[in-house]
Image (spheres, grey):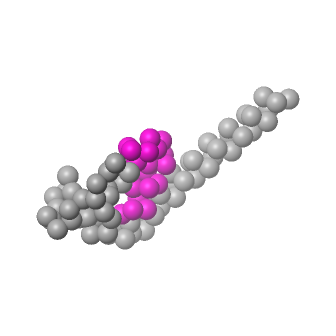
Amino acid sequence: MIKPRNIVKGYNQVNNPAHYVRIWWIEPIDFIMSNNIPFAEWCIIKYIFRYKNKNWLEDLEKAKFFLERVIKDFKEKEINKSIDKV
């Protein structure tokens, strides 16, 4: 089980970045790794977690890019499933 981080200790940009410390009790990397989330989905979570505290629109655009890729891959898998059934 992941324990809540002690956000009172402050931060450093490598191990405890401010754009996560201010809002979340868990860093995205801890959540992602404990749930075995695939890379593209990992990126979506990461950018959504931090956008208000770091790069705003840039992070939302990055999340959108990865979300569109996940959707594209999902649709392709669904098409391949239907082709395999024929």
Q: Quadrant of residue 49?
A: bottom left
Specify start and end residues of the magenta stretch as a single range.
32-50
Asked whether, in this view, residue 65 is left or right of residue 31, the answer is: right
Residue at 44% x, 41% y: name it. Answer: 36
Quadrant of the rendering where the C terminus is positioned: top right
Q: Main secondary structure of the magenta part?
A: helix
Residue at 43% x, 68% y: name it. Answer: 57
Q: Quadrant of residue 24?
A: bottom left
Q: Is residue 33 visible?
A: yes
* Residue situated in front as seen by the camera: 37 or 75: 37
Q: Residue 70: where, in percent of width, then height?
A: 57, 47
Which residue is situated farthest in the left direction here?
A: 9
Q: Residue 31: where, in percent of width, then height?
A: 38, 51
* Residue situated in front as seen by the camera: 70 or 61: 70
Above or below 86: residue 6: below
Above or below 48: residue 75: above
Which residue is situated farthest in the front direction here?
A: 1
